[in-house]
Each structure stands twice: as structure tokens, then as C-alpha cells.
Image (cartoon, rainbow, N blue to C red):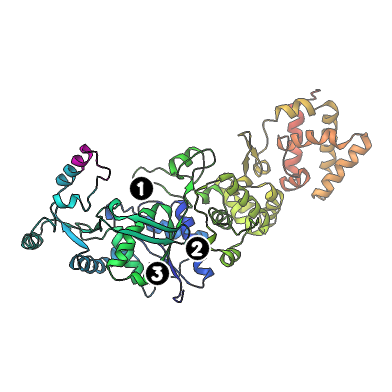
Amino acid sequence: MDKPVRVRFAPSPTGALHIGGVRTALYNYLFAKKEEGTFVLRIEDTDQARYVQGAEEYIMQSLEWLGIVPDESPKHGGEFGPYRQSERKHMYRQYAEQLVKSGHAYYAFDTPQELDAMRKRLEAAKSKNPTYNAITRKDMTNSFTLSPEEVQKRLESGEPYVIRVKIPHREEVRFNDVIRGWVMVHGSTLDDKVIMKGDGMPTYHLANVVDDYLMKITHVIRGEEWLPSLPLHVLLYQFLGWEADMPQFAHLPLLLNPPGKEGKLSKRQADNLGVPVFPMPWADPEKGEAYLNFNQAGFLPEALLNFLALLGWSPGNNQEMFDISQLEKDFDLTKITKAGIKFDYDKACWFNEEYIKQRKPEELVPLMLEVFKANGIAVDSIGAEKALQIVQLFQSRVTLIPDFWDKLEPSGKRLPQGKVLFVTPTEYDEKTARKKWTGEAADVVDTYKEHLTNLDNWVADDIKTTLEAILTSKGVKIGKVMPAVRLAVTGLSKGADLMATMEIIGKEETIKRLENALNTLGQQVS
């Protein structure tokens, strides 16, 4: 293609941005970067009845959090603006009227009652295609059944009307999709869609085509759910004389519910499974309901992008880890699959775990402290050095950022992680206490407590050396008593490096915990 590549992501501000929309935005962004083109964000707000306050801001904030920054948008501007369709209202009528004059569209004055009667009549006749089309338009109130004088009279009187496109009944619409190849649709299966509503606003179909043409969009990359609309859009390009400038189309495969659940990924089913489908926090402005989201769940944006990039696209090898620069270099529209892709949340979590492991510890400190703060910890008192120590202690054990505090185990129980550093245990793992808190173990813990009291250099290595010296003097192997020491300090049977944990907890608190365990557990013998 000789023209500079221009792509657009064009969401409607009718609610929160779904993760499927995020993938669409990502693919547009990656394609633009690969081709050294332009990525446009356009807000398609022609449906004012469904407009939701705050949705547009949510869309832009979500893309910014993920690093999908448009080159042109309502926020960034550009030479092809405005970038909100509601601000372009004056542009559309001329094209609708042009279609009427050329015979490719017509005025329809049907009342809601007349439309309802038509549908009921067709349903009663068991029509295979009960829509407003080349057959049914002959029995309705429109430019074809009214005289030109009557049409003009109604227009001048201000009678409500819409403009419908005239679909050729006996013609076939052919188009080529980058992902799906050649598609053919017969005109008899299509209906005469409304392209200009009674309120003077265009419908999605007309506004979409006009805006893509005026903004010089070269490729339309969007979800599979828009594929049924493409025959109409192709016809509009032809009817308006813009076929030579028609963009290439690529319709992405559907995202399906998590493994075990069929059908398109839905908020309701995902919510029931504890799986987020929104990128950022969002509360329904009418119902006030808050929904799960990837930001609050503890995902790093780069991990989520990597996961989403592979939901439909493959590099052609077994590589899974891609930073954004690699994705920009390797992305290829022709390597996108046609089949629907299951939204594997466990795989998303795996990506996040890998990215957390690769992050520099100091970069994770602010994120961890936010989690601690949310759990009532006075983070200002922790100190930079100690905070870094905590990150390094738990970094390899974290899947989601909230795991720095406690982590959901496969059993469904929550395993305290950072929590053990700040909360003195009042209960002890029953199974470990029963099997590992022996008289011998209690004796070692008691001796250990006394020796730690005199330890001046409170660092993990010296804390460990002290225990090893005691065990050597008593002729006890470390494996026999280590579970009991961990139990006394954390109340748990497992966790991060115990000596590093004790260093962070501090001398006074560690000794206090050992004393509490000795008093609470007693000298139980298994």
C-alpha cells in the first residue's frame, strides 16, 4: 500500500471498556507501530440514548495505563478532528442526502406502531427475513410509496422521519477480509438499515464509513461481531463513490469464556468465576455495582499486554514472552487466527508472575506499599531499605501484586506473606503443631530465644548461624526443628526464607513471638 498507514480504535462510551476492546486497541496500535503509521482514537458517541457519563474518560485512562497511547484523539488532537462523532454531527447529513439524491437511500416516515405491525405481520407469515427490506419497503410509508410531492410536504412540515439505505435485492456483495479471505453476501439477506436517525444523528453505519473516509483510515481492525455490518459498509463506500479509498478490513476472532465455559466472554460469567474483564476500576453509574478489573487484581500492564497480544495472534514459533518493542516489530495481521480464543485467566496470571520476577525490586516497592497501606499498615514508618528487603523476600512468590500481603492457595485458603511481618500470630497451624512441636523442638526454641537476646548484629546470616550453633551443641538436625521455629515465628507451616523474615520482623518482635509460642503451644509431644 502506497498510502501511509492509518488505523483507528473507535469505542462507544456506553460503559466500561471491555478487555476484548482493549485487545482490539492493542492490535491497532501494534499494526500502526509496525508499519510506522498513525493510531487514532475516535469516540463514537452517536447513540446519545446509551451514553454513560465517565465512560469516555475511562476508555482513555485505561489505554494510558496500558501504554496504548494514540497519536490522534480527543485528548491529543490532530489534523483530522474533531475525534468525537457528536462534534462531527454537521458533517454527516450531506452524505445521507447525497445517497438519497443518487437513489441509494430514501426517506421513511413509518411510525413505531407501523413498524411493529409490519414485524408482527411478517412473523405471522413465518417470514425467513422479517426486516425492512426490498420486499417490505413496498408496503411502508416511504419515498417509494409516496409521491415526490407528498414526501416534500412531509419534510417541510417537520414530520419525523429517518433515512434508510436502499439495499440491492438481487446483487451479491463481495469483500476481502485480511484474516478471513473472500466473503460473499447476497443482498436478499440484508435489510435497509437506518443511516440517519430522527434526531438528526447518523447511525453507526454511516458515521463509521464517513469518518473512516475523511480521516483517511487505511485499515479497519475490529472485532468479529462487526463482520455482519461489513456488507453494508462496503455498499456505502460504493454508493458514495469512495470504493477506491475503501480501507482493508480485518475482523478479529471472538474472545470466549474461560476454559470449560463456551460462548463469548461475558462480564456476568467472568464475574461469577472471579475473572476480571475490565482493565481499570469501574462502577456502574446507575446500579453502583463495582466490577473486577485487572488493575486492582494486581496485574502489571506489560504482562496484560503480552497476554492479550497472544489471544488470537501467534509469532509462528513457541516464543511467549514479548516486551512491547518486540510486539511492535513482530506483529503481523496475517498471522491472526479465525477461530475464537478461550480467555485463559490462569495463563494471564502466569504472565504476570513472570513479569513480576523480571521487574527490578525497587520498581515494585511503591506497588507493594499500596497493598500494605490498603491493609492498614503505616507505610511511612517502614523505610526505603526495609521496603526493598520485603520485596526481595517475596518477589519470587508473588503472582499478583496483592500477594505481597497474602496469597490465595490452590486449596482456597489464603497464605499470609507480607502479613506475617506485621501481624503477631495468635493461632498456629494445627497439623504442624501436632507433628513438629515436640519436646526436643520446644527445648531448641527456648534456647534459641535466649541466645537471640544477646545477638548484637541482627542480620539473617547471624540469626541463622546462632541456630546452627545451638543445633550442633545439642546434636539435633535442622530438619527436625526448623518447622517448629517457623511455626513459632509466623504461625505457619511454610513461607519465605525464615531468617530473612526474622531480620525484617526485628529482634524484639521475634523474641516476643518465640516466647508466645512457648507459652501457647507448651511442650507438646507428637
Q: Position of residue 235 (x, y in %)?
A: 30, 62
Callout 3–callout 2 Cβ contact below 8 Å: no
- Left or right of 502, for residue 316: left
Q: Which mark is residue 68?
A: 2
- Which element is circle 3 on? loop
- Which element is circle 1 on? loop
Q: In this rendering, is residue 512 above or below 392?
A: above
- Left or right of 218, for residue 455: right
Let me know if residue 86 appears in the view.
yes
- Left or right of 408, for residue 37: left
Callout 1–callout 2 Cβ contact below 8 Å: no
* Residue beneath disc 1: 285
Q: Residue at x 32, y 58 (%)?
A: 172
The amino acid pointed to by label 1 is: Pro
Q: Which residues are magenta?
A: 119-129
Please tell me which residue lies in front, 56 or 324: 324
Q: In this rendering, is residue 324 above or below 446?
A: below
Instruction: From the image, state whether disc 3 or disc 2 is nearer to you.
Output: 3
Structural distance between the alpha carbons of marks 3 and 2: 18 Å
Instruction: From the image, state whether disc 1 or disc 2 is nearer to you.
Output: 2
- Left or right of 100, for residue 88: right
Q: Quadrant of residue 83?
A: bottom left
Q: Residues within 10 Å of mark 1 (few under 14, many from 20)?
A: few
Structural distance between the alpha carbons of marks 3 and 1: 34 Å
- Which element is circle 2 on? loop
Image quadrant occupied by the C terminus: top right
The numbered mark, 3 or 1, whose residue comes first in the sequence reads 3
The amino acid pointed to by label 2 is: Ile
* Residue beneath disc 3: 217
Q: Position of residue 400 (x, y in %)?
A: 60, 48
Please tell me which residue lies in front, 70 or 343: 343
